[in-house]
Image (cartoon, grey):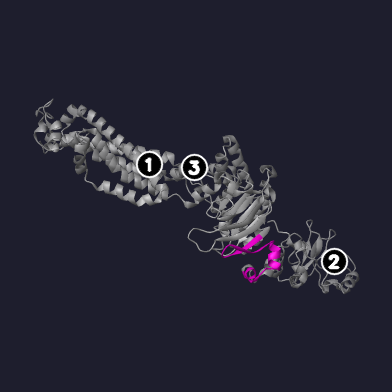
Amino acid sequence: MASPFLIAAGEVGGDFFHERSSGTLPCQAQSSHLFCWDWARENIDRYGTPTVQHLEIVLLSVVIGFVVAFALALIAHRTRWLQPPLLTATGVLYTIPSIAFFFLLLPVTGFGRDTAIIVLSVYTLQIIYRNTMLGLANVPDSAKDAARGMGFTDRQILWRVELPLAIPEIIAGLRIAVVSTIAIATLVVFIGAGGLGTQIYGSGNLTFPTSIVIAMAIVMGMAFLFDLGLLTVQRLTTPWRRVRAL
Amino acid sequence: MPPGQTGSQTQSQSGASSVRYEETTKLYPGATEPAVDHLSLEVPAGEICVLVGPSGCGKTTAMRMVNRTVEISSGDVLVGERSVREREPAQLRREIGYVIQQIGLFPHRTISENIGAVPQLLGWKKERIHQRSAELLSLIGLDPELGDRYPAQLSGGQQQRVGVARALAADPLVMLMDEPFGAIDPINRERLQNEFLRLQAEIQKTVLFVTHDIDEAIKMGDRIAVMREGGRVEQYATPAELLMAPANEFVEDFVGSDRALKRLALMRVSDINLWEAPLAHVGQASAEVRAKLAAPEVEIPYPLLVDSERRPLGWLSERDLDGETVPSRADSPLGPVLDRDDVMRDALADLLQGESQYAPVVDHQGRIDGVLSVEIISEFLASPDAKSDEHPAVERPHG
């Protein structure tokens, strides 16, 4: 059996150049040409489906990662002795090389999107967990003491005082998680999960930079927009951070 | 706050509860000695009880057992005759105002929302909370427009006022104040203390006030419990009693060697018997005035020139009396003029500042009431009379 890499590459690489412009465009002939506008104009619609796939994988991974990491953080916040082991566990998972992780899971979860989402959400755990814990730790003790003394229950202290005050750190974590997931998601092509990686790692593409440049631009634009979006959410949800102190 | 803004309509008088410690003990886990040891103490409703003592004496622990932010190991605390041990802690705490040194305003909530925190927990309607916040802002002398600001936009003093307002929001039966003015600079601390006393005269809450500063204790307390390590109360008395008759050496040391002077902070000029001034009216015959000076009970060698309303104008010298009649202008300037309502300590300070042995005391209309001298004060401090707690001097100055 051929290696998964070759299988994956074969999936996208096969007739990549043969559909429409079979080597007839002048700039396509020389691989030194970084960007071929003519090709880009003619082929831009190839990127629609991979972009949507990419988005789906990223969003699902981050949402799942966030739910799990947030739940872990809340549990660790209550149960102090769980904090060091959880930090270590999420940290160890984070250090597994991504390609190795994909292929390790292949026998278990098989080719396709599920494996991709599992790996990518595991990678977000460490960042989101750490930042949520950091945010909760930064809540001033005096605010918690006052809340408790005024008759807030533990649950009310968590949801009405601690979490609102931890929003900046939590969203900072989400921003890093989303941006890095958008980048790593280009690798899920190797386990047959599609995405914009198909336009970067297709076998023929490696000698034809235009497609790589376009895919790269879409990935970067996506990361930029998500980052900006989350930053906006953070600013809207934390108006007290923007006031001018006297 | 400016006195004009403390309108009485802004505070309902729904009352205060007494607080009673009954053999209350706190032994922290792992500790060999209790932090508070069989504390028995009663704070009558509407009074300020100050728990004072060196750090580690258990005063904060004692205070926190009232709202169960520290659990009681044995014994009990009764708030309004009801044991706090049988109350659900969160419910109990909503009936007890809580002010801490670090203030603990919620940075993410506006001033109005901070003040409305407990009413919100109690499920008040939005409009009622809003109205109550505005009411309290004016009660503590802050511009209602500050209600929409965030805590970071207020000064430390303003934040601490908001902390007090927040504690008062749901009209608590008892207030717990843990070194509430401890982090404020001395000048603002004095203002906040005065404001709180003025506020308290109006709202008459039962207040447990923790401090390590004996001067603050004397100023704020209707009663003071002096505590020492191990959570034992060495003396529980009014400020005057504490200064006049310290129960033991510990209290005496804690109160300080200047307790005689501190006593002066507890009295007003009107609390003491003044000398009568030999008065001289403009145009009066000099001989008549001289005769007055010669009387044996007159302590002051100079007559005081007063106008037709008996308002002091100045001290007359020997030379001023050389003429047939009393002149319309005095040779010596008047020096300091004291008010009957001045706090005695301030009056003494004025005398010393003016480098005078005595000064005229006037009433609200500015009419002469008598003369206060350094001699009167020192005699008062030395006399056994002063040590009787029947003396009217025990009344506490309000601001």
Which labelled disc corresponds to residue B133? none
Residue at which label 1 appears: A71
How far, Cα to Cα, is label 1 from label 3? 17 Å
Q: Chain of mark 2?
A: B
Quarter-of-image position of residue B25:
bottom right
Q: Which residues are magenta?
A: B224-253
Residue at which label 2 appears: B279
Count of marks overlaid on the render? 3
Towards the viewer: B300 or B280 = B300
Frontmost of labels 2 and 1 is 1
Q: Position of residue A110 (x, y in %)?
A: 20, 34
Marks 3 and 2 share the same chain: no
Kindly indicate whether the residue at mark 2 contacts the one at mark 3 (C-beta within 8 angstroms). Answer: no
Residue lying farthest to the front in this orientation: B74
Mark 1 crowd level (few <14, some 14–19, many ≥20, 10 Å Cα): few
Q: Chain of mark 3?
A: A
Residue drawn 85% across the image and 68% down it:
B278
